[in-house]
Image (cartoon, rainbow, N blue to C red):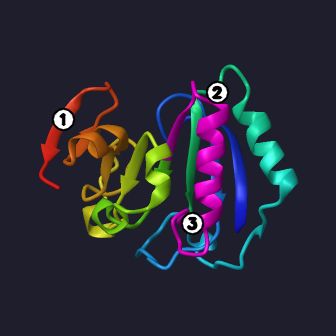
């Protein structure tokens, strides 16, 4: 897997203060994407042992609430094996931290992805420029959903999460 950056002390890509891993590779190619440099699966640099150590060093800081996987698309087929390993390792070693993941895939398309069991919040769906709404929190366009993954997996219905930790709605899945 390749990546572009590890952002420290991020407040824009999930609830609280976060570490963000920006992966390389995306086939969605959304019009007016805010990060098209990450589309190339061979872009960025190799995610190696040093990068992993940096990621977990930052995540281990007591003021950090969690980690966000973004990109590109962390769930690009070439990224899934490594992302699954990182999700599992994060969950095992940082039980008090939240795990968020942004993907252009719909939940329905990735519902069998084994790494879902480690994710707290999934932001799904491609960015659609004509649905762009800057008033929305954590998403770029109104079609994107902020999904409480654990509640969704246990209820077998998509459960939408909001920034006040309240259930907004259940959507038949």
Mark 2 residue element: loop
For marks 3 and 2, give the CA distance. Answer: 25 Å
Give whichever of 132, 142 is nearer the camera.
142
User: Regarding mark 3 in the picture, which secondary structure is present there?
Assistant: helix
Question: Which residue occupies the foreground of this view, 78 or 113?
Answer: 113
Q: Position of residue 155 (x, y in %)?
A: 21, 41
Q: Where is residue 107 in the image (x, y as percent from the top left)?
A: 32, 60
Q: Residue at x 50, y 54 (%)?
A: 115
> Which part of the image, by quadrant, shows the C terminus?
bottom left
Question: Mark 1 or mark 2, which is nearer the start of the sequence?
Answer: 2
Who comes first in sequence, dot 3 or dot 2? 2
Q: Residues within 10 Å of mark 1 (few under 14, many from 20)?
A: few
What residue is drawn where x is 81% and y is 44%?
A: 54
The residue that label 1 is drawn on is 168
Circles 1 and 3, Cβ within 8 Å, touching? The answer is: no
Count of marks overlaid on the render: 3
- Check the image and report above or below for 142 versus 10: below
């Amino acid at each position: 897997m390749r990546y572009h950056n590890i952002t420290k002390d991020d407040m824009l890509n999930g609830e609280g203060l976060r570490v963000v891993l920006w992966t390389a590779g995306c086939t969605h190619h959304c019009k007016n994407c805010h990060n098209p440099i990450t589309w190339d699966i061979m872009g960025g640099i190799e995610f190696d042992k040093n990068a992993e150590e940096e990621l977990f060093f930052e995540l281990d800081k007591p003021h950090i609430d969690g980690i966000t996987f973004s990109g590109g698309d962390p769930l690009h087929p070439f990224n899934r094996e490594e992302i699954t390993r990182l999700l599992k390792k994060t969950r095992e070693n940082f039980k008090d931290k939240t795990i968020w993941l942004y993907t252009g895939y719909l939940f329905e398309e990735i519902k069998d992805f084994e790494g879902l069991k480690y994710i707290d919040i999934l932001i799904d769906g491609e960015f659609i420029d004509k649905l762009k709404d800057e008033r929305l929190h954590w998403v770029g366009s109104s079609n994107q959903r902020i999904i409480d993954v654990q509640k969704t997996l246990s209820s077998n219905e998509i459960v939408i999460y909001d920034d006040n930790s309240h259930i907004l709605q259940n959507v038949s899945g």
